[in-house]
């Protein structure tokens, strides 16, 4: 199911902005998992010194919710001609990440006046590389006159504008999902399968043995045996394999993620994210106590899916034979 995370810039119980989000949640109905974020008031004050791994728990939770969402909606009043401090604070925590990069985002300022605040909201979200359009941004003036205490929109023009916004939001989310599957016009769709019989074993072996930095020289037989005994994910464009990952697991409490790659010519289109999302949502990999992996440079990708550096590395040991594939 498509996920929407809605962030209300007002923490007031009777907030008109919150009521607008509740209207959108109703329109979303059962086609969406529409979650209104409730943690704005309990986020710590942003401080770059605290913006290190592991991030404060509340921050990590919000980052994860944004990452997992197919679309984000921010609906906020203007306070003193600007963004409410608590919303700005939340957005400051996102600056060191790429989680808004290309994310379908809806931006509503609903306020007494709101023009300056709306301009700033657009500027901040543009800086975070969020994806929004004319259709997915909206300024609602004199909001308190437009929605009643029960959350009914009283003004037909406002309701029509909000419906246009919602339609724009749905379109943006669908277009983004499609673009992940069909990145360029004329190219075949990208798909992911766990069906080993479709895998291109020579290609996987060539990448792992020649191009990867972690398993140079790995014999074909070792790759074949590894695939046979793991839950493997192949990324395909049409018939051609363009990426791979495997999960070594007991499917009860532990999983090790290994051999993740996307061929260089297919990178930069969100395929590794699509692959990670598929792996993390796989029904056989739910409720595990621990996942582990090793990486030289892809920490940013994994962090978006809740991965963190080892909290207590002194409690872990390894038997490592880096020369195992070197020719004798
Ligand atoms: C501290 C404060 C500052 C405000 N500053 C502005 C402002 O600069 N521009 C504006 O249009 N409304 C301003 N307002 C009024 C809000 O737009 C109005 O109260 C709005 O309904 C608040 O949104 P909410 O109902 O979702 O809490 C301000 C309200 C407060 C409490």
Image (cartoon, grey):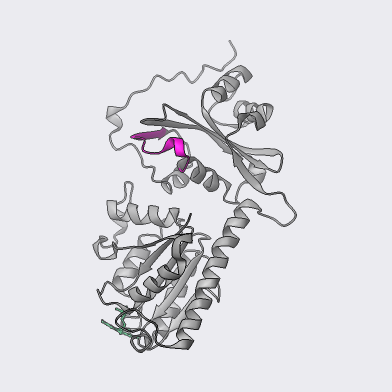
Which residue lies most toward the right here? 186
Q: How many marks?
A: 0
Residue located at (46% from left, 18% from top): 321
> Is-magenta flag for residue 289?
yes
- Asked if 202 appears above or below 191 in the picture, the reply is above
What percent of the width, then of the height, locates residue 180? 60, 53
Which residue lies most toward the front here? 30
For the record, the magenta segment spans 281-292
In this view, the residue in front, 193 or 222, is 193
The answer, for residue 109, to whether it is visible in the render is yes
In this view, the residue in front, 56 or 247, is 247
What percent of the width, then of the height, locates residue 171? 57, 67
> Left or right of 271: which side holds 186?
right
Residue located at (60% from left, 41% from top): 192
- Asked if 126 appears above or below 305 in the picture, the reply is below
User: Which image quarter has ligand 1?
Assistant: bottom left
In this view, the residue in front, 204 or 318, is 204
What percent of the width, then of the height, locates residue 269? 60, 51
- Asked if 251 appears above or below 277 in the picture, the reply is above
In this view, the residue in front, 327 or 275, is 275
What percent of the width, then of the height, locates residue 258? 49, 31
Quadrant location of the C terminus in the rendered image = top right
Q: Quadrant of residue 201?
A: top right
The answer, for residue 218, to whether it is visible in the render is no
> Is-magenta flag for residue 230?
no
């Amino acid at each position: 199911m498509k996920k929407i995370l809605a962030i209300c810039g007002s923490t007031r119980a009777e907030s008109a902005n919150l009521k607008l989000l509740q209207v959108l949640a109703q329109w979303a109905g059962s086609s969406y998992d529409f979650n209104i974020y409730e943690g704005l008031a309990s986020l710590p004050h942003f401080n770059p010194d605290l913006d290190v791994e592991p991030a404060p728990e509340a921050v990590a939770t919000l980052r994860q919710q944004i990452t997992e969402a197919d679309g984000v909606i921010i609906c906020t009043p203007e306070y003193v001609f600007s963004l409410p401090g608590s919303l700005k604070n939340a957005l400051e925590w996102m600056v060191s990440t790429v989680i808004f990069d290309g994310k379908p985002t809806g931006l509503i300022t609903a306020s007494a006046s709101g023009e300056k605040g709306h301009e700033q909201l657009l500027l901040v979200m543009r800086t975070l590389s969020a994806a929004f359009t004319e259709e997915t941004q909206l300024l609602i003036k004199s909001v308190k006159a437009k929605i009643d205490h029960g959350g009914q929109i009283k003004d037909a023009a406002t309701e029509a504008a909000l419906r246009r916004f919602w339609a724009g939001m749905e379109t943006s989310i669908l277009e983004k999902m499609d673009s992940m599957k069909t990145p360029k016009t004329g190219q075949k769709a990208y798909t992911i399968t766990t069906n080993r019989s479709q895998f291109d074993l020579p290609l996987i072996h060539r990448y792992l043995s020649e191009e990867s930095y972690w398993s140079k020289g790995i014999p074909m037989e070792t790759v074949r045996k590894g695939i046979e005994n793991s839950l493997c994910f192949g990324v395909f464009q049409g018939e051609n394999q363009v990426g791979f990952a495997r999960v070594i697991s007991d499917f009860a409490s532990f999983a090790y993620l290994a051999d993740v790659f996307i061929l260089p010519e297919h990178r930069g289109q969100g395929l590794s994210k699509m692959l990670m999302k598929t792996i993390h949502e796989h029904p056989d990999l739910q409720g595990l106590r621990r996942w582990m992996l090793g990486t030289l440079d892809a920490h940013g990708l994994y962090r978006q899916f809740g991965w963190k550096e080892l909290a207590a590395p002194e409690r872990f040991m390894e038997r490592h034979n880096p020369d195992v594939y070197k020719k004798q």
